[in-house]
Structures are given as C-alpha cells and as structure tokens.
Image (spheres, helix red, strand yellow):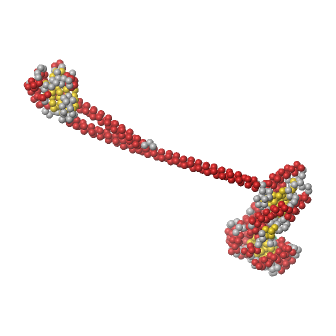
Amino acid sequence: MFNLSRYFSTVSFILIVLAAGVLGPLYQKLSLQQMKDLAQGRNVAMAQVFQNSLHQPLLDLLGESTGRDASALAQSTSRAYIQGSAEILMQGTSVIRVKVYNRVGNVIFSTDARQIGENRLASPGFKAAINGSVLSDLTYRNTRDGFEETLAEMDVLASYIPIRGKDNAVEGVFELYQNVTPFVEELEHSLWWVTAGIVLTFALLYLMQFLVVRRAQGILEDQEGRIKAARDTLELQVAARTEELKRTNMQLEGEISERRQAQSKLNYLAYHDPLTGLANRRCFIERLEESLRETAQRGERLAVLFIDLDQFKQVNDSLGHGVGDELLVAVASRLAEHVRLIDMLARLGGDEFICLMEAVRDEREVEVLAQEIIDALEQPFQLGDHELFLTASVGISLFPGDGDSVLALMRNADTAMYRAKFSGRGNYHFYTPDMTQLAQERIQMENLLRRALEHGEFKVHLQPQVDTRSGKLVGAEALVRWESPELGLVMPSRFIPVAEDSGLIVGLGNWVLRETCRQFMNWRESGFELPQVSVNLSVKQLERPEFIDVLDTILADTGMSPSHLKLELTESVVMAVGDSFGLLDKLRSLGISLALDDFGTGYSSLSYLKMLPIQQLKIDRSFVEGIGTNGGDEAIIRTIMELARSLDFEVVAEGVETEEQAAFLAELGCQQLQGYLHGQAVAPAEFRTRWSKAT
Ligand code: C2E
Ligand code: CA
Ligand code: CA
C-alpha cells in the first residue's frame, strides 16, 4: 500500500538537505562578500590615510625608484621615513603590512623590507589597480596567499589600490594586508548558527507537516480498512450465496428424480384406492363422464348407487383403525364377488362406496342390484376374534331423470343414501327432489342453531328414573329441547347430529350441563330434593382438553355437588376419546357417577368393560322394545343382566313403556327404569309438580 508518511519523510529529508545545502553556502557567500567589501573599504580608507600623510615622501620614493636597484631603494631615506611613519599609522589598526609598487610593478616599499625589489607586474591585483580599480583577495589561514603565494597564519584580505597623483593619474599602487581573522571567525560562527537555524526551522516544519500527514495517513488507512472489510464481506456473501445456489441446485435435482419416481407410483395411485385396490373417486368420475356421453347418445338410462356402511364408525372407534381397514377390504371383496349386475365399483373414501349400472331398462333392475348389495353384507364378517355384523344404506340416482352431470348424479345418490339411513339400517332409497329440500333444511338448521344458544331457544327437560321395586324417584335424565321460532319444537334426534357435525355441540352440551346443575341446585334450595341428575355428553365435548376445567367451573359456579351428578356416555364415545381411561378416572375421582348409554348396540369387549370406571349400564331402548315379541332382544337383556351382576354394575333400562316390560326387567333384577311408563321428559316446573307429591 502507498505509505504517505514514508513518502513524505523521504521527500522532506531530501528537500531539507537541499535547502540547507543551498541556503547555507548562499548565506556564506553573501556574508563573505559583505565582509570583504567592508574590509576592502577599510583598506582603501587606510591607503588614503597613507597617501595623505605620506604624500610627498611617497612621490619622492616613486620618483627615485626608476632605475634604482632594490638594495639602493632599501637604503633610501624616504623609505626609512615612510617605514617609520607607516609603523606609527598602522598601530592600533588591523593592517599588518603595506606595500607600494611603482608603475612597472616593482615593490619600492614594504613594511617587510625583504620584499623590496620584487616585481608583480603580472599579478592580477596589480594589473587591476594600475588600471584604476581596486581589487582584493581573501586568503584563509594556512592556505597559500593568492597574490604572493606565501602561507598565512591568519585570515588576510589583501587589497591593491591605485595611488593617484596630480591630474588623478595612477602613479603607483598600494598593497594593504588586513588581518580579518576575527571577522572570518565571526562569520563562521554565525554561519553555523544560521545553518542550525535553517535545519531547526525545517525540522519543525517537517514535524508539523509530518503530524498532519500522519493524521491523513491514518484516515486513509482507516478508509482503506473499511473498504477492505466491505469488500471482504461482499466476497463472503457472494461465496455463501454461490454455495447456497449450488445446494439448492443439487436439492432441486434430487427432488426432480424423486418426483419422477413418485410420478409413476402416483399414476397408479391416481386411479386406485390403495387400501382395497378398487377404483377411486377420480377413476369413477372419469368413467361416469364417458359413460354419460355414450348413454346419452344411445338414448339409454344409467344408475349411480351410493353405498354407506351403517356401523362402520363404531367399529373403527371401538376396535381400532386396523380392524376398520380389514373390514373395508373384506367389504370390498364381498361386493366385488357377489354383486353381478355392477358395471363399475369404486371406493370414494372412508366407508363410502359407489357403483355404476349402465343400460338400465327399468327401475326394478336397479332395486335388485341394491338389494343384492345389502344382502351381500348380511353374513357376519369374521376378523380375527371378532364377529362383526354390518348393514349398508344405499342411495340411488338415475340418469337422465335425477341429473345429467356427474356431480349432480353423485350428489343426489348421496342425498338418497342419507334418506335411506334415516329410515333405518340396511335400506335403499331412490332419489326424489324433496330430498334436496331436506338437505337444504339441514343447512338452514345449522344456521339457525348457530344463534339459538345466544337467543335462549334451548330448554332442558327432565325424564324421571325410578326404582324398579319401590317405584320411588331416584333420578332424572336431562334431555335438551329446541324451541325454534322458525322451526317450532325440534327434537334432539334431528338437531343433535347437526350440532355434532358443526361443532356447535360443545357450547350446547356445556350449556345443558350448567343449566341442569343450576336447576338441580335451585330445587334443592327450595326444598325439592331430587336424588341425582344425569346429563348426556358428546364425544366432541370430551375431546376438548379444557373439558375438566369447564366442568370444574360449572360445579363451582352452581355449587353443585359432584356426587349428585351422573354423566351418560355411549360406548363409541368412550372408545373415541384418546385417553378415555385417564379422563374417566379423573371424573370418577371428582365423585361424579358414570353411566354407559345405549348399552348393547356397540362392540365393547368384556375385558374392556371390566377396566372402565363406570357404575351403571343403560340397556338400549331397542332391546326393551322387543320384550314380549322378540326372543333375541330378551336374550340380549338377560346376557346384559348377567354381565352386570358379575362386573357389579347397576342397570337402568330406558324406553320402558309397558307394565309387561317393567315386570320382565324387574324379574331379571334391573334396578332402575326410565320410560314413558313413568313419565316423559317434561319442563322442570311440570316435573316438580308431578314428583314433589310422590316423594
Ligand atoms: P338418549 O340419551 O338415548 O335419550 C333417551 C331418548 O329416548 C330421549 O329422546 C327420550 O325422550 C327417549 N325416550 C325415553 N323414554 C322413552 C319411551 O318410553 N319411549 C320412547 N319411544 N322414547 C323414549 P330424546 O329426548 O329425543 O333424545 C334423543 C337423543 O338425543 C338422546 O338419546 C341423546 O343421545 C341425545 N341428547 C338429548 N339431549 C342431549 C344433550 O343434552 N346432549 C347430548 N350430547 N345429547 C343429547
Ligand atoms: Ca341418555
Ligand atoms: Ca339411550
């Protein structure tokens, strides 16, 4: 990197040396010249003094000199006189020698007598002086004198000065030697100081500038450092980005090859249900589209049959998904084997199957097919240890009567299937336009349900439960009623499924729980002591992690004692909740009683039942109904009673309408009865009026 300080130092050093080298000698030269001029002036003045004081003797001597030899001159009286006078004149001055030359360059007088007679005609000083000008020469100590070539012991300035006679003509030449040693010494001394001064000044200047330059250098370096850092970061970023791009590229390549593999698998999966190997929804839709075109061209009819298994959800919930899957596979192969009239069978997902019948001549053909489907599932399925009974509900739509698009035909068959299910398990139903109306009503109901809670449209009714032997009131079941301004009184069997599907059941169920507890405590406080009250719980409520907290709050808010509260759960609810054991244990430890509702319709195993912390079984109404007419139902009730005895459960029978049913149940040891025989579910006020007299 360019080093400004070093560059500056080098250049400055050279300049200082140069300046000192030039300025020093310049000063010396100038001062020397000045000193010489001064000394020369003094010599000229001295020469004048000589000339003035020794005018005549000098002229005499000059006159005498012509033609006389040196020794004669040395003996002359004028010379002796001049010698004496000169010595006197020189006293106290710095002139140390005086010489006089005649016009031809002979020394005719010198304070050093030995020099008399010497000729200096060739000397430049003499030549200048004889021509009328003054010339001086400085001889330094211990060097040879320029004019006389003798070694001097002092610094001497010798000056040749013309001697003018009358008419101002040059008659001879003076040579004066002046001792200038003190001046030269002084000059040398001052020269030393001046040089030192110059060097010092420059050094100071240098120092100041150096500081400035060094600061500038610092700034430069700082900036360069920053630029370098920025460049480095940039380089790093570029490198990182390049690396990242490379990686993304590789990842992309990997993904592409993975995708290709997946693609071929997908191509198969795209048209098949992986579980059963049947065609899937997409495959069915494409086939139906094609079939619709051809059928329309030929002016024929076709049928779409929507099949839904009735108890599949219960099997799945109680026995697990593994058994559920096995069952689906078994159903698929049964349908494929036994149903001859099907043109195409597909599984839509879950427990929904769909099939296509082409070239339909009349509806009876379709009826036969639907019945075949239902019959095919009649025989029980043996899966491991489980023997499972299944029924299917079938909905049928016909082309062109019930729609001319795939979507319409499938939707209408689905709607018809709901209708079939509604009229009882194991049924088929043809689509009719009023069914769509029903489906729309369901949507309307959901919308109305949404605000029903806020609008206070729900009421809790209570149905008595009595002791079988004494006929005394032992409890009541809370059953919700909906008094809708738009729909009138709606029974739970209509709106509870809608509330379950939409999730509204959570808010509704919690409200029923709170309202029941409130009513119960209200009665207690006013002296009507109902021993216990039961509330139905939906799986959706139990699934909520905050359920226990909600329950706690309700108990705390209403002051309800848990020992007076019974919760009714169906088998499928118990099976469906993840940690049902933990949850039920928690409810139990709060002191709440638990009843298993609709008992006998589910698939609970004996060992499973044994582990549940429940106290009561509720025999489902459908079995009670068969008492006296259906031996199978009676047998089931007997089995339930034996089971309850051995597992130490209390039993309550629901839907008891006749004395005969009551007697049958009493005989078997059923402890409690609930049903129209003892009273329907009624509003609290009516309930109290009826039962406060009896207790
Ligand atoms: P569930 O729990 O099995 O309730 C018994 C149902 O049988 C009630 O119908 C009751 O009125 C009816 N019933 C009682 N005795 C007789 C009888 O002697 N003969 C006949 N034919 N029926 C009788 P409801 O009130 O229509 O309730 C239907 C279902 O709605 C209930 O069946 C229950 O599953 C559900 N439900 C009712 N209230 C609630 C509630 O607050 N929460 C939840 N999650 N479900 C409720
Ligand atoms: Ca119940
Ligand atoms: Ca029930």
**Can you say which quadrant of the picture contains the N terminus?**
top left
The residue shown at (32%, 35%) is 22
Q: Position of residue 325 (x, y in %)?
A: 76, 64
The residue shown at (12%, 22%) is 65
Q: Quadrant of residue 123?
A: top left
Q: Is residue 287 above or below residue 560?
A: above
In the image shown, does 497 or 612 lie closer to the viewer? 612
**Can you say which quadrant of the picture contains the C terminus?**
bottom right
Q: Residue furthest top?
A: 167
In the image shown, does 290 or 352 lie closer to the viewer? 290
Q: Quadrant of residue 15?
A: top left
Q: Position of residue 466 (x, y in %)?
A: 80, 77
Q: Quadrant of residue 392?
A: bottom right
The residue shown at (25%, 33%) is 32
Q: Position of residue 455 (x, y in %)?
A: 75, 62
Q: Is residue 657 visible?
A: no
